[in-house]
Amino acid sequence: MELRYPWFLLLYLPMILLVIYNLKRREPSLSVPSLKPFLSASKGAKIGLLPRIPFILFCISLALFIFALARPQKGVEEIINRTEGIDIMIAMDLSGSMQAIDVPERIQTEGELRSAIESKVLKTRIDTAKEEIAKFIEGRPNDRIGLIAFAPLPYVACPPTLDHNWLYAHLDRLQPGVIGDSTGIAGPLASAVNRLKDSEAKRKIIVLFTDGRNNVNAKITPVQAAKLAKQFKVTIYTVGIGTPNAIIKQRGFMGGEQYIPLAHEFDEKLLKDIAEISGGKYYAAKDAEGLEKTMKEIDKLEKTSMEQPIFVDYKDLAFPFIKAGIILLILSFVSGSTLFLRIP
């Protein structure tokens, strides 16, 4: 609650002076030749509170009127969020090579390698990518985000949505190699553009993750897909995942497991061309730290604008105080003229 005209409370000062004056002023008196009859009649009598009740009611009534003049109000604050979200399609490579593990230079021996893998210090490319994408999604609650998985062909794992819990569930289910081992880059780009072209969002972007080279003959080339994206004002960010020093787990002879080297495959020039044509940017994510840095930079480049106008709806509370003041004022006059009537 707040007061619209708090300066009216200054009227309490003269009211306090009135109360002090009333308490200290002498009662009306008569001149008489002797006080003996009166002293014997008033022996042991005390001045009580009851005779002052009309005045007390009057003071409380006056205090209520002054408080009502200050216009007490109760405000209900309403904050309205206006967001201009961004529609985002994430295209994730699910070719078999996404099971690979990129080994940093600090790991030199097989023992160190196995220890790092068992302790989850080193993760597969797909697990690292899913972890960083989940962080990216978490930081953009007002954006519609969709998910496309691809290998030879693309499929829409989740259309653009604000239900990010549903999106997380689909992201978590992605596994490399289940839809093939080759990599077709044109298909997911064209599919993502098709999902975004009719969007009314102020910005439409695609983030494509791949560790492979385009080796699928589709109806259109990746460069043509990038030009299609530019036509519909869709920006593409491309992320090349992996390093030359990578290994992949395979079943060895007699059913055992072994790690074998994996060739460095993604086509950096093609990914740069796709990003440049659409007005986006290419990133090389060599390891988990590189991918984390990439996602943070994309997040900074594509900020969602938000306005928060604040509206306060005030409810006037003066009337109940005025009503109570009037009732007490009437009681003051009635009681002073009846129950507490004083005759000098």
Image (cartoon, rainbow, N blue to C red):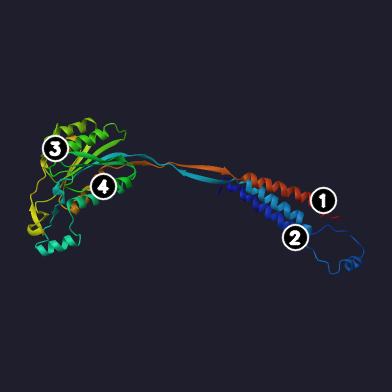
Rendered view: 115 above or below 275: below
- Residue type, mark 2 in image: Lys
Looking at the rendered structure, the secondary structure element under dot 2 is: helix
Upstream in the sequence, badge 1 or badge 3? 3
Upstream in the sequence, badge 2 or badge 4? 2
Return the residue nearer the eye: 159 or 273.
159
In the rendering, at what x and y percent does residue 157 appear? 25, 42
Residues packed near mark 1 inside 10 Å, few (<14), some (14 to 19) or many (20 plus): few
Residue positioned 33% across, 39% down in the render: 85
- Left or right of residue 73: residue 151: left
Upstream in the sequence, badge 1 or badge 2? 2
Q: Quadrant of the C terminus?
A: bottom right
Looking at the rendered structure, the secondary structure element under dot 3 is: helix
The residue tagged 3 is 273
Residue positioned 9% across, 46% down in the render: 265
In the rendering, at what x and y percent does residue 188 appear? 19, 38
- Residue type, mark 3 in image: Asp
Question: Are discs 3 and 4 less than 8 Å apart at CB?
Answer: no
Query: Alpha carbon of mark 2 to alpha carbon of mark 4: how far?
Result: 83 Å
The residue tagged 2 is 24
Looking at the rendered structure, the secondary structure element under dot 4 is: helix
Which dot, 1 or 3, sits closer to the camera?
Answer: 3
Which dot, 1 or 4, sits closer to the camera?
Answer: 4
Query: Alpha carbon of mark 1 to alpha carbon of mark 2: how far?
Result: 22 Å
Q: Residue furthest top?
A: 231
Question: Are discs 2 and 4 less than 8 Å apart at CB?
Answer: no
Question: Are discs 3 and 2 less than 8 Å apart at CB?
Answer: no
The residue tagged 1 is 337
Question: Are discs 1 and 4 less than 8 Å apart at CB?
Answer: no
The residue tagged 4 is 171
